Image (cartoon, rainbow, N blue to C red):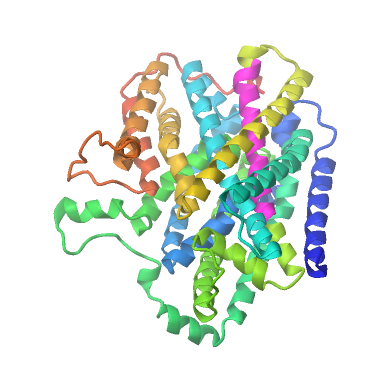
Amino acid sequence: MDSRLAIDALVLIAYFAVIIFIGLRMGRKERDLEDFALGRRQIPWWAVLASLIAAETSAGTFFGTPGEGFTLRNYTYLQLAFGTIIARILVSYIFIKPYYDYRVFSIYEYLTVRFGVATKNAASAVFLVTRLLASGARLYVAAIALALAYEMITGTRPNETQTLWIYVGSIVALVLLTAIYTTLGGIKAVIWTDLIQASIMIGSAVAALALLYFAIPGGWHEIVQRRGEFHVSDLITTGLDPAKHGWQKIAGMFAIEYTIFAGLIGSTFMTMSTHGTDQDMVQRMLTAPDVRRSRRSLILSGLADIPIAFTFLSIGILLWVYYQAHPDATLSKTPNETFCHFILYQMPVGLRGLLLAGIFATAMGSLSTALNALATSFTRDWYVTYIRPGANGEESLRAVRWATVGFSVLMIVVASATSYCVIVLPDVRIIPIVLGIYGYTYGSVLGIFLAGMLTKRRGQDRGNIIAMIAGFVVVCIISGLPNAVAHIFGGQLYTQPPWLPLMEFPWWICFGSITTFIVAICFRTEKPEAAPARALS
């Protein structure tokens, strides 16, 4: 092996060794499900903050966000970060306290208390399926580095079959390594390794940005000359068509992915769903000792989103300028691979290994939290309720560990299928795919939680199921999903009415949750909500 590659390989090996050691060390002496799922609520708030950042900054973000910057050459994607701050404040003061009051392990247990078992089962099932698909869909991204590394080492680009095998092999290795410390260490292993992974991710991104800037001849002058002057419209866009009037002027706004309205409204609903009704995100918030410190970690993670997104978008824009100044015939036409191509071919030895470690850090950080949350939700909502009622602490711990193994296998299947789709369709962008998966189902779940937390006597099991279905149907219509599926088979189910625009993914959860909430509150609660009880724990 080339000595330079050997140094990078040693950096990667050292990273994996440290992560697994810390994960197993921090997660030792687990006794029951509360240890595995919540770390006995003894995790410092600053570690929870780092874990939140690591969980939401996946490998999809590491490559997908620079891909957005490279493709669009502006910062309009950053508008979505504005809504995440608003949403986190709302989640902090609407959602977190009830979860602490009822001392839930799975947040869907709250729905049992508020409405009934059927609502809890529906929401939990939606989470299990959606989180599995979304996390699996973005998992393949880390394998991009290995596919491009193969090309660099051999001098030939792998064909589609070889690329698929490289993707699948790296996915299996990544999931196995992550599953080891997640299965044995539980949430404590997840959070403390997330702290390391978030530090590596942020540090490597800042190093890449600085290196890119100084690699461009002429610096800022060259950037402005090639890309053009930066204006407010490069960050803030309304999407309103000045040539149209009335509803038609407003309707066009919904058909644009990144606008200030999508950021302040659509992104607020998106983040409320992912950070308020998704077991993956909420579970780590519940490991903090109390509500106050949980809120602190959540709100600060929102403030951190803006500089992180800005950094990755800047990397994408500078990549475009760099390759304009340094044309590269081997550069992939897929925007998602551009950053990785730069890392492999332009980064100094050692730093390249650190950047590759950053890629795997983001993938493992988001994967470990997803596996932990999926296993916890399945065990608490289904296993101890239907499969083994009355299971003791040791039995529940054994079950949640086996569930982690099972979801690891399923994650490999989903990620491998996604890899095949991306290879066949190389122009696919990562961010819309991942956020789009959430968009179809999380609006229904958010609408039900809002009905439960904002009202006292509205909503009940049968009505909630109807409401969730209605929310899903509305999202399908405004996204054009039925026609998109029919188009694959050469047909068309219906003609989209001119007054109803096809809406982009930032709006799906918004309209899905509003629809679900309105339908749900049409039904009156059949029983009063039980008082917070320690029995849930």
Whole-percent x and y of residue 519?
32, 27
Whole-percent x and y of residue 499?
18, 45
User: Is residue 157 or residue 487 the one in the foreground?
Assistant: 157
User: Is residue 50 or residue 361 the one in the foreground?
Assistant: 361
Whole-percent x and y of residue 237?
33, 64
Picture quadrant where residue 236 is located: bottom left
Q: Is residue 194 left or right of residue 218?
A: right
Q: Residue at x 49, y 72 (%)?
A: 320
User: Is residue 198 or residue 402 the one in the foreground?
Assistant: 402
Whole-percent x and y of residue 112?
52, 20
Please tell me whether the stretch drawn in magenta is mainly helix, strand or loop. helix
Q: Residue at x 48, y 66 (%)?
A: 70
Picture quadrant where residue 493 is located: top left
Is residue 522 at least partly visible in the picture?
A: yes
Q: How many marks?
A: 0
> Residue 367 magenta-drawn?
yes
Location of residue 134 with respect to 106 vertically, above or below: below
Location of residue 535 with respect to 160 vertically, above or below: above
> Residue 138 magenta-drawn?
no
Location of residue 389 with respect to 407 vertically, above or below: above
| Magenta span | 359-384
